Structures are given as structure tokens and as C-alpha cells.
């Protein structure tokens, strides 16, 4: 039994690690700080799970007088989704409050929201796997693992990604009331999709639930692609000046304002080795961050010391260029 419990943990953690790497890769142009991503994941895995368990148990207790089955269905359909999405959303609120400079647009909101959701899903899956093993035996345990870890493995990532988009868009929204409205609308979307998923699952309509989830995933994918294009447009607009200032070379600008980043890195790897290829990657990411900070300066002003950050990034790019060609 102990070995199967350990395998349950691995079965929950391994797909989660792959999904986290997927969302890390999705953030192509300017990676988010690993410390913030780790913090988002840990919040999803520990505090948000504990808060949800405590509040859901307290709210569901009066329903037990109508029977355990009724309490379970009502609890999972009407109580759990809002409680869990708010608990996970607290991490995004914290990022928005104290590290908002890292939320450059929809893509960052998606990444942070998904990572919070993946932390929550991993711990929840471990609980489900252990419960199935203890209460229903080996057959149920072997069935639930691929269903929850693979088929429905991105559920919480999808739900909380919507909340993340709300916080990311609030950054560029004027007026405190309007910002709260933007966040609330996207949080309500996350709750609604979560409720619909649980309702369909409780009704035994797992195929419809799966279709709903993957339709939501398709919507997120469309938003990711649009974000990629938007970021390239920012680089094309804001980095042209850097060529005239001598910060960037024309070839580097062409790479940044096109879709040739990966091919440029591979060419550098073949010609100059791993060390120079890694320097080029850092240079490209610094330049992408420079474009984003110039975009923020144009639309938000000196929100988080943007001018000072821009100057520091320019110096960093010059330093990396010297290392690249030394």
C-alpha cells in the first residue's frame, strides 16, 4: 500500500511538471522570474488547497442533513468552484499587488494563473488517488489516475488562467472601479467554467465535460497565439529606436521583429557553441523585456520606475552584445 501511495504522488507530480514546462515554454519572448513562478505554484499547492478544504467543509456541513450524496453533489457543483477559484486567485492578486511589473499582458496572466492551478491540481489529484485506492480498490485507482492526471490534467490550469488574464488586463485599465470590474468578470468566467465542468461530471456526462474543457483550452491557445503576435508587434515598434541609438544591431532587430528567434539561436549554437547560444538567448530576452517596458512607459508612465528599468536593460544588452562577439 505504501508503494502505491508513493506511485500516486509520482503519477500526480510527473504530468504536472510536464504541464508547468509547457507553460514556461509558452512564454517565449521574456520568461517570468522563476522565483515568482515557484511562489505561484506553491500557493496553488498548499495555502489555496488548505483554504478551500476548510471553507468548503464548513459550508457543506449543513447540507449533510439531506444525505451524503446530495451534499457531495451540491458541494462540488455550487460551493467548490467559487471557493477554489477565489483561493487560487489570491496568489494572482498578490502578484498584481506586489509584482505587477512582471504582468506585461494576457500571456503573463495565463502563465501565472495556469501555474497556480497546476499546483492546486497536483495536490488535489494526490488526495483523489489515495481516496480511490483506500475506498474503491486497485481497479478504481488504476482508472482514475489517467483520467485526472491526463484527460482532465489541465482543468485547474485552464480555470485560473482566465483569472490571470483579468489581472493582466486590469493593469492597462484606467480607474479603480473599472479595474475591479475587469478582474471580477474574468474571475466569474473561471468560476462558471469550473461549475459547468463539475456539473457535467456529476451528471455522468464526462465526454461533454471533456469537450468543454478542451474548448476552453482552445480559447486559451488562441489567446496565447494572439499574445505572441502582439509581443512581436511591440518589439517591431519599440526596438527600431534602439538600432538608431546603437543599442541593437540591425540583424538582431530583424530577428526580434520576426519569427526567426529559434533558428537564430540554433545557427549560433552550430557556429559558436553552447556558451554563445546561451548569451544570445539572454540578449534576445533582455531586448524583448526592453520592448515591453517601453510599451508600459508609453501607456502607464512611471508605474514601477520604467525609465530606470529601460536604462538598465540597455546597459545589459550592450554588455551581452560585447560578450556575444568577443
Image (cartoon, helix red, strand yellow):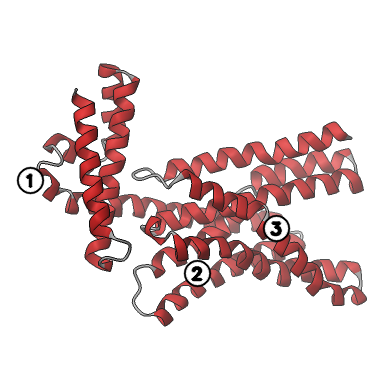
Q: CA distance from mark 3 to mark 2?
A: 21 Å
Q: Are marks 3 and 1 in contact (CB under 8 Å)?
A: no
Q: Secondary structure at mark 1?
A: helix
Identify whether 223 is placed above or below 273. below
Per the image, the residue denoted by label 3 is: 49
Count of numbered circles in the view: 3
Q: CA distance from mark 3 to mark 1?
A: 52 Å
Of pointers 2 and 1, the one earlier in the residue sequence:
2
Q: x%, y% of residue 33?
A: 44, 46
Per the image, the residue denoted by label 2 is: 186
Residue at image x 79%, y 45%? 129
Q: x%, y% of residue 21?
A: 51, 39
Per the image, the residue denoted by label 1 is: 244
Q: Secondary structure at mark 3?
A: helix
Structural crowding at the residue carrying mark 1, measured as other residues with C-alpha within 10 Å and reported as few (<14), some (14–19) or many (≥20)? few
Residue at image x 55%, y 56%? 158
270 on left or right of 123? left
Nearest-to-viewer mark from 3 and 2: 3
269 on left or right of 245? right
On the rendered image, what quadrant is the N terminus found in? Answer: top right
Identify whether 164 is placed above or below 253. below
The label number, if any, that marks residue 164 in the structure image: none
Q: Are marks 2 and 1 in contact (CB under 8 Å)?
A: no
Amino acid at each position: 500500500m505504501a508503494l502505491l501511495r508513493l506511485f500516486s504522488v509520482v503519477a500526480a507530480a510527473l504530468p504536472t511538471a510536464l504541464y508547468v514546462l509547457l507553460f514556461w515554454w509558452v512564454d517565449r519572448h521574456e520568461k517570468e522570474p522563476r522565483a515568482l513562478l515557484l511562489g505561484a505554484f506553491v500557493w496553488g499547492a498548499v495555502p489555496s488547497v488548505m483554504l478551500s478544504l476548510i471553507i468548503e467543509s464548513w459550508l457543506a456541513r449543513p447540507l449533510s442533513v439531506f444525505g451524503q450524496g446530495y451534499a457531495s453533489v451540491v458541494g462540488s457543483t455550487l460551493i467548490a468552484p467559487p471557493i477554489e477559484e477565489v483561493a487560487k486567485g489570491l496568489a494572482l492578486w498578490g502578484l498584481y499587488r506586489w509584482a505587477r511589473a512582471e504582468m506585461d499582458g494576457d500571456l503573463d496572466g495565463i502563465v501565472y494563473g495556469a501555474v497556480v492551478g497546476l499546483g492546486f491540481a497536483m495536490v488535489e489529484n494526490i488526495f483523489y488517488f489515495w481516496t480511490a485506492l483506500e475506498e474503491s480498490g486497485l481497479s478504481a485507482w488504476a482508472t482514475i489516475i489517467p483520467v485526472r492526471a491526463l484527460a482532465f490534467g489541465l482543468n485547474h490550469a485552464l480555470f485560473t488562467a482566465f483569472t490571470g488574464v483579468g489581472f493582466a488586463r486590469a493593469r492597462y485599465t484606467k480607474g479603480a472601479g473599472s479595474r475591479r470590474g475587469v478582474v471580477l468578470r474574468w474571475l466569474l468566467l473561471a468560476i462558471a467554467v469550473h461549475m459547468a465542468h463539475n456539473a457535467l461530471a456529476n451528471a455522468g456526462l464526462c465526454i461533454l465535460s471533456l469537450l468543454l474543457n478542451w474548448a476552453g483550452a482552445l480559447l486559451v491557445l488562441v489567446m496565447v497565439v494572439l499574445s505572441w503576435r502582439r509581443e512581436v508587434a511591440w518589439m517591431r515598434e519599440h526596438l527600431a529606436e534602439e538600432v538608431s541609438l546603437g543599442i541593437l544591431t540591425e540583424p538582431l532587430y530583424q530577428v526580434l521583429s520576426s519569427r526567426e528567434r529559434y533558428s537564430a539561436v540554433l545557427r549560433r549554437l552550430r557556429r559558436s557553441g553552447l556558451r554563445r547560444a546561451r548569451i544570445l538567448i539572454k540578449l534576445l530576452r533582455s531586448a524583448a523585456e526592453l520592448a515591453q517596458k517601453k510599451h508600459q512607459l508609453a501607456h502607464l508612465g512611471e508605474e514601477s520606475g520604467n525609465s530606470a528599468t529601460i536604462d538598465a536593460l540597455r546597459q545589459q544588452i550592450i554588455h551581452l552584445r560585447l560578450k556575444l562577439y568577443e
